Image: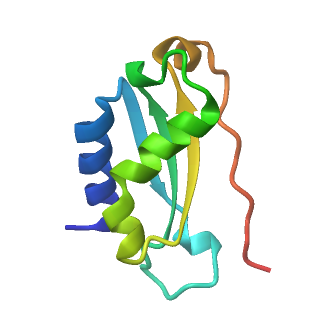
Amino acid sequence: MSVAQNIIEKLTEALGPAHLEVINESHNHHVPPNSETHFKVIIASELFDGKRLLARHRAVNEALATEFANGLHALSMHTYSPSEWEAQVAVPDSPKCKG
């Protein structure tokens, strides 16, 4: 199973998202072709209602602890409550890290 599929499964199980996108951004970094080391996660969950950004990020990091231990290098997180997600106009682009 791919790292992206593992991320989807773990976040779905742990956070029951109303919305979830997992985007492999490894190609924007200095890694071998077809790497799965850098991801962007866009997630909306009822569990984030009333939680501060740090608590939301901790919840995502806890759900993905195994992936980080097994080579996931970087994770860009955009975490929303369902109402915040509905009001969201656009998710920020990730920087291009290749020189």
Q: Position of residue 19 (x, y in %)?
A: 40, 28
User: Can you tell which quarter of the image residue 68 is in?
Assistant: bottom left
88 vs 7: above or below? above
Q: Relative to 42, is 94 on the left or the right?
A: right
Q: Position of residue 30 (x, y in %)?
A: 63, 84
Is residue 72 found left or right of 6 in the rendered image?
A: right
**Farthest-out residue, bottom:** 32
Q: Nearer the viewer, residue 5 or 62?
A: 62
Q: Position of residue 54 (x, y in %)?
A: 61, 39
**At 52% across and 35% down in the image, what residue appears?**
56
Q: Position of residue 3 (x, y in %)?
A: 32, 66
Q: Nearer the viewer, residue 87 or 50?
A: 50
Is 95 placed left or right of 9 in the picture? right
Q: Is residue 80 above or below residue 91?
A: above
- Residue shown at 28% from the left, 29% from the top: 16
Question: Quarter of the image holding residue 69?
Answer: bottom left
For the N terminus, the image quarter is bottom left
Q: How is the image coloured?
A: rainbow
Question: Is 62 located above or below residue 88 in the figure?
Answer: below
**Residue 78 placement: quadrant:** top right
Task: Give the answer, above or below, for where 81 lies relative to 96.
Answer: above
- Of all residues shown, which one is farthest toward the left? 1
Kindly identify the residue that appears in the image at 40 percent across and 18 percent down. 46
Q: Quadrant of the C terminus?
A: bottom right
Residue occupying the point 74% across, 59% down: 95
Q: How many marks?
A: 0
